[in-house]
Amino acid sequence: MFRVKICGVTTPDDARIAAEAGADAIGLNFVPGSVRCLNPEAARSVAAAVPTGVLKVGVFAGAAPTEIRRIAAEVGLDAIQLHGHLEGSAGLVDPPDTCAALADTGMKLIRAVRLEADGLAAARRWLAAAEAAGARPALVIVDASTPRNAPGSALGGTGAKVDWAALAREAPLGIPLVLAGGLDPDNVAEAIRATNPSGVDTASGVESSPGRKDPHKVRSFVAAARQALIAQPG
């Protein structure tokens, strides 16, 4: 679906910078409480700056399928990323049947999961339940662990890193896997060599301040990631 995603893009200029640097996807954040959260009007301006061929991914957490559909149509998204908690009865939880509820939109579905103390056990339960409900995502993004029922501000873009060695020991999920969590221009190549992902995703690692991308960091990240991805075995 994509190899290099720059997430938390908040301005048309930053969208153009990411695309010109060679990113093949950008993330538009609609998570309440996040410093990078956009309203649909602002998101439309950002999306309009994205050239053809670059995937526009909407990042949601705990949103109802009807709301996701509305925003996706208003903004012109290409893919939907569910970034809420995997389990729980309150807070920003994305239940497994959300994929089935959105399957007829024609948009690619992405699920962010987290590497916990017990590895990807919760992710495996969620994916199995999603498949049983009628549809599962086409792609999984592995992000850093967060406290159960953490607010939107703590769900991503915090700079917290995934334990690469622990992830490398995990059995495959049966779905293409993208690595996120604390990636920056200086460590992305090492992270790729350690985990052999299908792609990588970053937000805070290429910023000059929360929500604003640093052009030099974006270009350096994309170049380092692409070189390392090409060099992967197999």
Image (tube, rainbow, N blue to C red):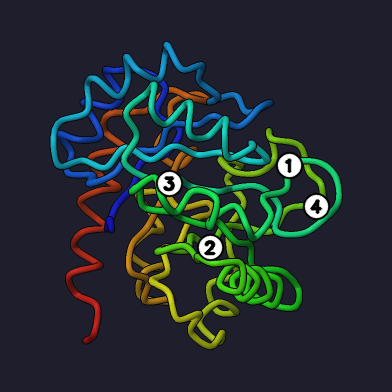
Task: Say which residue label 1 marks.
Answer: 92
Label 2 or label 4, whichever comes before in sequence order: 2
- Say if 233 sits above or below 93 in the image: below
Name the mark on residue 147: 4
Residue corresponding to mark 2: 142
Q: Residue at x 35, y 17 (%)?
A: 44
**Residue drawn at (43%, 46%) of the image:** 202
**How many discs appear?**
4
Rounded to the nearest angstrom, the CA distance separating label 3 from label 2 is 11 Å
* Label 3 environment density (alpha carbons within 10 Å; few <14, some 14–19, many ≥20): many
Disc 1 marks which amino acid?
Answer: Leu
158 lies left or right of 73:
right
User: In the picture, which quadrant includes the C terminus?
Assistant: bottom left
Q: Residue 211 versus residue 206: which sits nearer the camera?
A: 211
Label 4 element class: loop
Q: Residues under labels 3 and 4: Cα distance?
A: 20 Å
